[in-house]
Amino acid sequence: MKDNIKERVVIGIGEVLWDILPDGTKMLGGAPANFAYHVMRQGISAVVVSAVGDDSNGKELCRSLQAKQLPTAIEVVEFPTGAVNVELDNCGIPQYDIIENVAWDNIPATESVLALARSASAVCFGSLAQRFEVSKATIRTIVQSVPDDALRVFDVNLRQHYYSSETLEWSMSHCDVLKLNDEELQCFVLLFDLNGDETDCCRQLISRYEMSQVVLTKGAEGSLVVTSKTSNFVPAVSVEVVDTIGAGDAFTATYIASILKGKSIAEAQYAASVEAAHVCSHAGAMP
């Protein structure tokens, strides 16, 4: 990766919110914020682009991100700050109750955000924050505004009914790297009529949507990265799991940061596995 790309900023755009855990504890959350935080942990400049409400939750969220020294481009809008009620199963796997029509559903496309996009080395966006029209339009404007040599990363996050074939197809058509997990791949198999094994399915997506690679995480089993000509599997790092909240975001962030540093796919996968394991061994997404 060129040196000038390394010096530019990595953007995570979409939801920032409070994860409300079963015991009532509030944890910073939202995939783009998690992503930006873990990119920063890898020594690369990162910023989260989102929105909060003019309320106590929004002020506390911004203070918490500031305490973690994570740069932000967060607008205050006339909607409540986002929150998600989280339930954990016996294996620590989260289930989410996501409140609708909140601040991060209404992220404005400000000139300062567009200026950030024009200086990006990478942008990571998901499907969840495209559920409402305002944020969908802003995300798509940002993705189309980054430099030609920037990495565009679509990190799928299928939650409840908050996705559509149109959103998924647009996003795949405008990304270089598709990141999804094994459960999400099974949904894609049905939605997009894929066939064969996991590698075959990933290659069909690469060919159909002209992406450079698909990053498939498989939980405790490991991860698979597929390009048009190669595939590489790396086992997961074994740890005692507290919860898996944010582990996928940590994986994505560390993988992309490693690629930006010029690491090989295998090296980036291993580094990502180590960081994901670290997150799994602690409570919340930003330990």
Image (tube, helix red, strand yellow):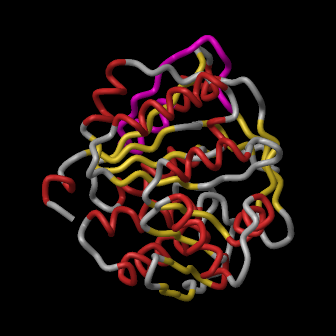
Residue farthest along the top direction in this orientation: 78
Describe residue 195's horizontal placement relative to residue 7 as left or right: right
Q: Is residue 202 above or below residue 287?
A: below
Residue farthest along the front direction in this orientation: 208
Describe residue 255's horizontal placement relative to residue 243 as left or right: left
Q: Residue sitting at 35 percent across and 37 percent down? A: 71
Q: Is residue 276 magenta?
A: no
Residue farthest along the left direction in this orientation: 3
Q: Is residue 147 above or below residue 100?
A: below
Residue 142: percent from left, percent from top: 42, 34
Hey, which quadrant is residue 201 in on the image? bottom right
Residue 14: percent from left, percent from top: 55, 37
**In which quadrant of the rendered image does the N terminus lie?**
bottom left
Give the magenta range: 62-82
Q: Residue sitting at 53 percent across and 58 percent down? A: 209
Hey, which quadrant is residue 263 in on the image? bottom left
Q: Is residue 63 magenta?
A: yes
Q: Residue sitting at 46 percent across and 62 percent down? A: 211
Residue farthest along the right direction in this orientation: 90
Q: Is residue 196 above or below residue 114?
A: below
Describe residue 265's horizontal placement relative to residue 34 as left or right: left
Q: Is residue 218 above or below residue 74?
A: below
Q: Residue sitting at 60 percent across and 82 percent down? A: 199
Residue 241: percent from left, percent from top: 68, 75
**How many numbered callouts?**
0
Residue 17: percent from left, percent from top: 62, 36
